[in-house]
Image (tube, rainbow, N blue to C red):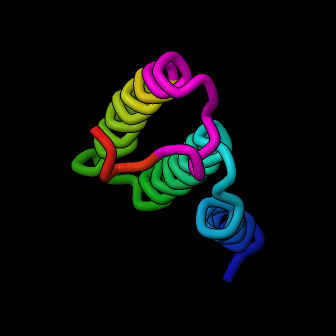
Amino acid sequence: MTPTHFAFSSAFTLGLTGLAFHRAHLLSALLCLEGMMLSLFIAMSLWTLQLGTVTFALSPMLLLAFSACEASAGLALLVATARTHGTDRLQNLNLLQC
């Protein structure tokens, strides 16, 4: 495993562990998701450059578009929960209460 592959896989793993273990605030969960998507984007871009084929050239841009959509939906949910509940703490959110 090359050092660049190790760096991007460890960045993805750190984002995943941050998402799994530090779930106090919705904003921290969104930041962990964005870190994971950024490491995937850079890894896919480097993989496309190493292969040198044209067929996989659009896949990093497609991933980046989906990442932007995910970020906008997450921020919309963050604003909605901050307005209704007054905080972004995940412990205060109750899915059973309408």
Q: What residue occupies the far front of the structure in this picture? A: 97
Q: Is residue 46 visible?
A: no
Q: Point out residue 11 in the picture as x, y percentages from the top left corner.
A: 70, 61
Determine the residue positioned at 27% across, 45% down: 54
- What are the residue bounds of the magenta stretch? 79-93
**Is 81 covered by the magenta stretch?**
yes
Q: Considering only vertical position in the picture, is 37 above or below 4?
A: above
Q: What residue occupies the far bottom of the structure in this picture? A: 1
Q: Point out residue 27 in the picture as x, y percentages from the top left corner.
A: 63, 36
Question: What is the chief secondary structure element of the magenta stretch?
Answer: helix
User: Which of the 4 quarters of the picture holds residue 70?
Assistant: top left
Q: Considering only vertical position in the picture, is 87 above or below 10?
A: above
Q: Is residue 16 left or right of residue 94?
A: right
**Is 38 covered by the magenta stretch?**
no
Q: Considering only vertical position in the picture, is 80 above or below 64?
A: above
Q: Point out residue 58 in the picture as x, y percentages from the top left corner.
A: 29, 39
Q: Is residue 21 left or right of residue 67?
A: right
Determine the residue positioned at 41% across, 61% down: 51
Q: Point out residue 52 in the picture as x, y percentages from the top left corner.
A: 40, 53
Q: Nearer the viewer, residue 55 or 42?
A: 42
Q: Nearer the viewer, residue 35 or 41?
A: 35
Determine the residue positioned at 41% across, 37% down: 67
Q: Quadrant of the C terminus?
A: top left
How many numbered marks have been drawn onto this rendered protein structure?
A: 0
Q: Quadrant of the N terminus?
A: bottom right
Q: Considering only vertical position in the picture, is 47 above or below 21?
A: above
Determine the residue positioned at 42% across, 28% down: 77
Q: Is residue 85 visible?
A: yes
Q: Is residue 71 left or right of residue 32?
A: left
